[in-house]
């Protein structure tokens, strides 16, 4: 077992059959055969999004889909409510600004979550808000937002409900239709466990009405073009898509269907609970408040007196387990354990075995096995 | 040999070792090991571009790179000279308009090429022109533009020289530094013979100065962010890249180095000449003027009385050879034979054998072997 175990909030370990599917011969992306693959893949995407709406695949990262969402609905000067409590909330805001909308920021402390009531108050304060942007699972802080409860609030307002489920879809509860999400975006390389390089997006009729009323401020990411090409015969994408990655995500989505989406989410919930228990057993502290902590990534405070290169470097170099560091002002202050995609007790046992040894090596007076023990107890 | 032979102007046949490289395990795109792969791959890209400048890889299609070029240098109101003689020339113009620059169109009849003198006249007419956009190889019409000679003209003007080499780089002569190209873009799935889904771009210092003087009007495609991340330790991309496709293009670029870029271009020139000879031997007519016809794709007029579904449908369904149709107003009026990437006499022999049989089947009074015969004679 020479290969490094990636315990990142994406990219995640990709199943061999997905890698195999990816290496199939390339077909013409303007052919009937590709049209069928594209249609079946986007239908499966809609199933995972839990929506009756059509889904679209973009060749690009999750950020591309975030920009597709905003640049397709913004007319310069529009007011957008950006919920900002981490790096990806900030990103939505930066995209909002770049496309010349007015960002109304709802500031959340990093490590905490927005509440439905805060959304309500912000919308009541300014009835001109055209859309809100919300990150379901803030990968940078390990915080999960209550998208279901916020959805209920959003029912009472005209503003579009735009949700980034990049690092949650396929691992945490997302129900686009029930929650009333108008535009939902995700990425291939997180809980869906496909390789990086694809993003998916789905829009309600309400969202399409807004799209139709504005001139997109992006060419490559103009959703009108994706809708038009997707409705063609054969269905296609406006620009050359990443055919191999579509083979890969198709296979990854089939795996999700085989496992069952509910089973998969339960598996993620168990992994998250086990991870939190193991973190605490090792005497470490969670970064976010536990009640808002993510189902797919756990952020942990860097222990006193330990540097990021010491902790993550030892994990990587000595024990071949790769964790993620903190981003921006959290760099060096937290580390993050991704438990998304095809994660079972096995990967967590390896990870906490490695983390126990690393801490022992760095001089902590602990039994290096207590983390793994907590994992085992969480799975029994 | 059951599989369909793709004779398209992209995507092209991908070598088995490239597909194999693509299916390697995914590494963390924020790791030193990926940084090395990314650096080596972009250095190879610069070698193929023939430039001392750095190159960048975008997760997206060639269109994404075209938009990256323009959205990174445009301030609304700027004047851009768009040379428009086909679908991709139009695309540059559409992107120009979308980013609120003023497009000055230099209209070229589809099937003909712009001349250096026309460029000179257009630039002399309006000294405010900030940049010109030119498609080296207009895939939609099978026309090649004299980018070297136009480069000499451009030396005398401040306007940036932006060239799309999406369907020429690696198959036709491109020398970014010698021709004085300021921004050059390409795609993975054409002459480079990697799978679709990646684009590459390189910029001169002059171009970077302009980039630094404007606020990009695109977030995902903002070149400033690619430069910054690319200069980091480890070098990386601003957003999650398509790791697997970078493995693939890395392998494809190594193949080009092994073959030798000059040998590869000569091979493309031979294939183009052979194709034109075979087209004429079968009594068909080239769409573009022969002296401006492309080295990587040959556009052929649809023979009188034959429909596109008859010709390309028979080729595909009966003989398992896929050709491209015409686009936009050329739909049904031309068909296109791509001879880019890993093309040898073998694929052309199959293609013209199939085309001969197809025409015979459609009632043409020809010897179905004359096309293949012309291919053979061109290769001896």
Image (tube, coloured by chain):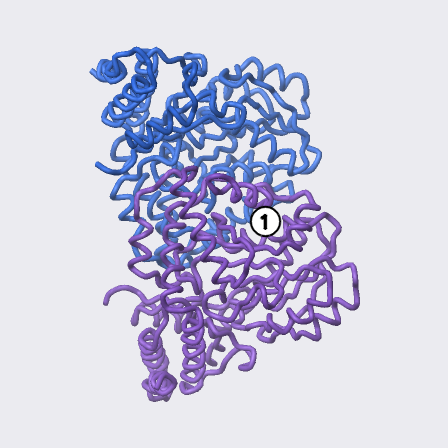
Chain colours: A purple, B blue
Where residue A373 appears, x then y in whole percent?
34, 87
Where residue A209 appears, x then y in whole percent?
68, 50
Q: Quadrant of the C terminus of chain B?
A: top left
Where residue A301 appears, x then y in whole percent?
49, 77
Residue, x 56% and y 45% (percent of image)? Answer: A227
Question: Would residue A11 appear left or right of A70 to someone viewing this image?
Answer: left
Residue B81 image-quadrant placement: top right
Disc 1, SS: loop
Residue A88 image-quadrant placement: bottom right
Residue B293 visible, this orientation: no
Residue B158 image-quadrant placement: top right
Where residue A244 appears, x then y in whole percent?
37, 47
Residue A114 visible, this orientation: yes
Q: Is residue A184 above or below residue B246?
A: below
Q: Nearer the viewer, residue B27 or A217?
A: A217
How many numbered marks are there?
1
Q: Quadrant of the N terminus of chain B?
A: top left
Mark 1: few/some/many CA within 10 Å (<14, 14-19, 20+):
many
Q: Is residue A354 above or below residue B229?
A: below
Question: Would residue B109 appear left or right of B179 to someone viewing this image?
Answer: right
Please name the residue that numbered disc 1 is placed on.
B219
Residue, x 41% and y 66% (percent of image)? Answer: A8
Residue, x 24% and y 38% (percent of image)? Answer: B2
Question: Would residue A359 appear left or right of B153 to someone viewing this image?
Answer: left
């Amino acid at each position: 077992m020479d290969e490094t175990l990636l315990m990142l909030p994406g990219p995640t370990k990709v199943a061999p059959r997905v890698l195999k599917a990816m290496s199939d011969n390339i077909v013409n992306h303007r052919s009937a055969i590709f049209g069928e693959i594209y249609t079946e893949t986007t239908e499966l995407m809609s199933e995972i999004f839990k929506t009756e709406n059509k889904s679209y695949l973009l060749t690009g990262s999750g950020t591309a889909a975030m920009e597709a969402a905003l640049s397709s609905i913004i007319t310069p000067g529009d007011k957008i409510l950006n919920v900002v409590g981490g790096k990806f909330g900030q990103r939505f805001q930066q995209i909002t600004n770049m496309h010349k909308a007015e960002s109304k920021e709802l500031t959340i402390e990093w490590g905490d979550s927005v509440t439905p009531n805060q959304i309500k108050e912000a919308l009541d304060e300014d009835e001109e808000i055209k859309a809100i942007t919300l990150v379901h699972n803030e990968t940078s802080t390990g915080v999960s937002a209550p998208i279901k409860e916020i959805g209920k609030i959003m029912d009472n307002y005209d503003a579009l409900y735009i949700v980034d489920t990049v690092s949650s879809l396929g691992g945490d509860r997302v129900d686009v239709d029930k929650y009333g999400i108008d535009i939902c975006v995700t990425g291939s390389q997180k809980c869906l466990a496909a390789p990086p390089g694809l993003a998916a997006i789905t829009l309600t009729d309400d969202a399409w009405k807004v799209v139709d009323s504005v001139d997109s401020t992006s060419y490559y990411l103009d959703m009108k073009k994706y809708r038009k090409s997707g409705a063609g015969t054969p269905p296609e994408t406006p620009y050359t898509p990443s055919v191999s990655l579509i083979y890969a995500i198709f296979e990854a989505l089939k795996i999700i269907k085989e496992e069952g989406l509910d089973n998969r989410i339960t598996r993620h919930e168990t992994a998250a609970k086990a991870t939190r228990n193991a973190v605490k057993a090792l005497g470490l502290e969670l970064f976010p408040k536990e009640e808002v902590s993510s189902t797919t990534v756990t952020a942990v405070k860097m222990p006193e007196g330990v540097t990021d290169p010491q902790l993550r470097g030892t994990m990587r170099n000595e024990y071949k387990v790769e964790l993620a560091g903190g981003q921006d002002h959290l760099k060096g202050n937290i580390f993050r354990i991704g438990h998304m995609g095809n994660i079972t007790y096995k990967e967590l046992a390896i990870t906490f075995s490695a983390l126990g040894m690393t801490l022992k090596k760095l001089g902590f007076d602990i039994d290096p096995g207590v983390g793994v023990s907590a994992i085992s107890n969480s799975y029994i």
